[in-house]
Image (cartoon, grey):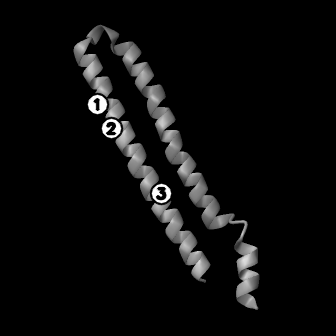
Amino acid sequence: MEFFAWCVLAAGIGMGIGSFGTGIGQGLAIQKAVEGVARNPGASGKIMTIMLIGLAMIESLAIYVFVVAMIILFANPFTDTVVQLISK
């Protein structure tokens, strides 16, 4: 059972670090976009479009972390091996 506890811990820590990193990245992107619009209001349409594309790319990193965490929890390839070793 220790293996599964480590899997849960790894998935939780991975999600925490991934969410923290993407949150910081999105905050910095929005900060710079607002500064750009404040300096040049005429370019707000282009800045908004580029910012939204960038935010989508940053958010995809969080989704990748979530997918890896779900693989660790539910589709771990080592689960059968560990269960066999534990049952011996």
Kindly identify the amino acid type of the residue bearing the numbered disc 3.
Met
Residues at marks 3 and 2 touching, judged by CB atoms closer than 8 Å: no
Query: Relative to residue 37, is residue 10 depicted above or below?
Result: below
Question: Is residue 9 shown left or right of residue 4?
Answer: left
Kindly identify the amino acid type of the residue bearing the numbered disc 1.
Gln
* Image quadrant in which the C terminus is located: bottom right
Circle 3 sits in a helix, a strand or a loop, which is it? helix
Kindly indicate the quadrant of the structure image that contains residue 36. Answer: top left
Looking at the picture, how far across and down is residue 28, in whole percent?
33, 35
Kindly identify the amino acid type of the residue bearing the numbered disc 2.
Gly
Task: Name the mark on residue 15.
Answer: 3
User: Among all residues in the image, which is located at the extreme bottom?
Assistant: 88
Question: Is residue 18 shown left or right of residue 33?
Answer: right
Q: Which residue is mark 1?
A: 31
Residue drawn 65% across and 65% down?
74
Q: Which residue is mark 2?
A: 27
Looking at the picture, how far across and down is residue 15, in whole percent?
48, 57
Residues at marks 2 and 1 touching, judged by CB atoms closer than 8 Å: yes
Kindly indicate the quadrant of the structure image that contains residue 31. Answer: top left
Q: Earlier in the sequence, mark 3 or mark 2?
A: 3
* Image quadrant in which the N terminus is located: bottom right
Query: Relative to residue 59, is residue 37 depicted above or below?
Result: above
